[in-house]
Image: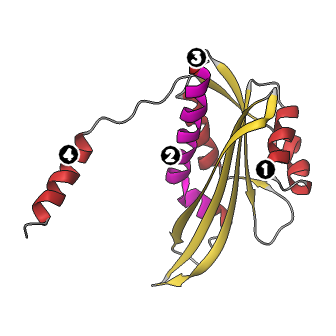
Amino acid sequence: MPMVLPALLFATLAGCMPKAAVVQAPAPLDVAIVSALEPLDAAEVLPVPADVGAALEALVTARNLRPQALEQQAWEGAFTKGRTTRFRVAHAALASDADLVLVVEAFARYGSQLGGRYRWTVQVTASLAEVARPEEAVTRSFEVPVFLQHHHEREAEAVQAATGVIERQVGLLLDQVLGGLSAE
């Protein structure tokens, strides 16, 4: 019982702590957003679910950036042929007239069935670069374990279930890069 009180106090106080403010771009900048999903059983690369794309646009907007989603036909063929992050960032930069390019790549892998739910691991690589210097992209890679309820749910549902973590991690990437731009 004595351990319950400190844990309860910590949880209560943690909820009262102020959230870290997002880093604002020093001036309004345009950012091209490409968010791609690589399905397990298909050769082509697809866009992420619409909810994930909307969350990425909201993250960008909150940081004094103007989102510009690159049309799927502008990147789909190149992303299917070139599988490296470096190539994809460079291609997105060439296809865009924005100031920055944000490339979010997602890959979902089925793990197992546990307790009637289906365990997936979503691997994400997010990169942000100035369009003029795509070779200097800052990249953050992370994995998100998710559980889905139904057997028919696949990669898109797994990525959608990971939206909250993707938002937080991409937000940290944006803050890191924008903090550097503000210091210049």
Q: Is residue 178 magenta?
A: yes
Q: Amino acid at mark 4?
A: Leu
Classify 10 Å Cα crowding around label 2: few (below 14), some (14-19), many (20 and above): few
Depth-wise, is mark 1 or mark 2 nearer the camera?
Answer: 1
Looking at the rendered structure, the secondary structure element under dot 2 is helix
Q: Position of residue 81 (x, y in %)?
A: 92, 55
Residue bearing the label numbered 3: 26
The residue sitting at 58% across, 16% down in the picture is 26
Mostly what secondary structure, the magenta segment?
helix
Q: Position of residue 125 (x, y in %)?
A: 67, 52
Residue bearing the label numbered 2: 168
Looking at the rendered structure, the secondary structure element under dot 4 is helix
Name the disc covering residue 85, or none: 1
Nearer to us in this view, 19 or 44: 19
Q: Are marks 3 and 2 in contact (CB under 8 Å)?
A: no
Magenta part of the chain: 158-181
Q: Amino acid at mark 2?
A: Arg
27 lies left or right of 168: right
The residue sitting at 59% across, 71% down in the picture is 120
